[in-house]
Amino acid sequence: MLASQVSTFARGDATISPQSTARGRTVVRATIEAKESRIGKQPVAVPKGVTYTLKDNHLAVKGPKGSLEMSFPDTMVFTEEGDSIKISRANDTPDARKGHGLYRTLANNMMVGVSTGFEKKLKLLGVGYKASMQGKDLNLALGYSHPVIMKLPEGVQVTCPSNTEVVVSGYDKVEVGNFAAIIRSKRPPEPYKGKGIRYENEVVIQKEGKRGK
């Protein structure tokens, strides 16, 4: 308890006010003021070519890449400021403080997604490992006795610049990241030779193989 109070004073978000009691003793009371989230207080920019509607904390955005909508809790307050949206807390309850930065990020991802989109790149490492598009499905050869055929979810596009590269793109960051993770799970990198499917620039820590006596 004492340590948490000391850290609070060090951050400068607490005020100390001495008060006198009936017996003449002075009691020091600390009033803690909740600071605004560094991420949450940043305005959400509305890119050119993107339109949105905001009603009763329900945000719907539409842009060149697609459209998204989401309902936000009552702990958040939306304020329109020109070409941006300001998200603030309705109160200082724990739920409002914890969700401030999160909901600001989700709203920003919606704006970025419908305007420029998101993408995840994966690489296939291994002898005979190949990726190609078979119509609208993704065909993976991963060393199994059968090819791995994957159907694309709605709103997600997949391209194969080469037979060892897969690019997942779309306007919904959650769907893009989720489908990329599913592709990787079909043959995760093994720890000895590093064979498998990995994200671009992913570092795979390899183990040392067993040595003979």
Image (cartoon, rainbow, N blue to C red):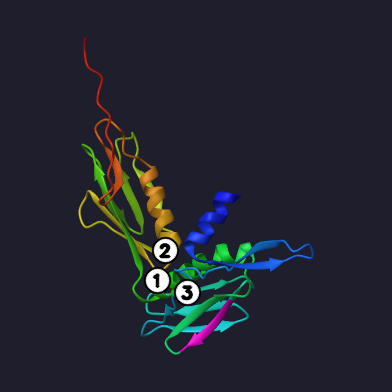
- Numbered badge on residue 173: 2
Helix, strand or loop for disc 2: helix
Image position, residue 80 (x, y; %): 51, 86
Give the labeled residue for mark 3. 41
Q: Does the magenta stretch include residue 80?
A: yes
Asked if the residue under mark 1 is in contact with the one under mark 2, i.e. CB atoms within 8 Å, the reply is yes
Res 166 quadrant in image: bottom left
Q: Is residue 208 magenta?
A: no
User: Along the polypeptide, which appears first: circle 3 or circle 2?
Assistant: 3
Which region is colored magenta? Answer: 77-81
Kind of residue sitting beneath label 2: Lys
The residue at 25%/26% (across/down) is: 208
Image position, residue 21 (x, y; %): 75, 65
Closer to us: 75 or 21: 21
Kind of residue sitting beneath label 3: Lys
Extreme-bottom residue of the structure: 82
Give the crowd class for mark 1: few <14, some 14-19, many >=20 residues within 10 Å.
many
Nearest to viewer (mark 1 / mark 3): 3
Distance between mark 1 and mark 3 Cα atoms: 21 Å
Image position, residue 81 (x, y; %): 47, 88
Give the crowd class for mark 2: few <14, some 14-19, many >=20 residues within 10 Å.
some
User: Along the polypeptide, which appears first: circle 2 or circle 1?
Assistant: 1
Distance between mark 3 and mark 2 Cα atoms: 22 Å
Give the labeled residue for mark 1. 113
Kind of residue sitting beneath label 1: Gly
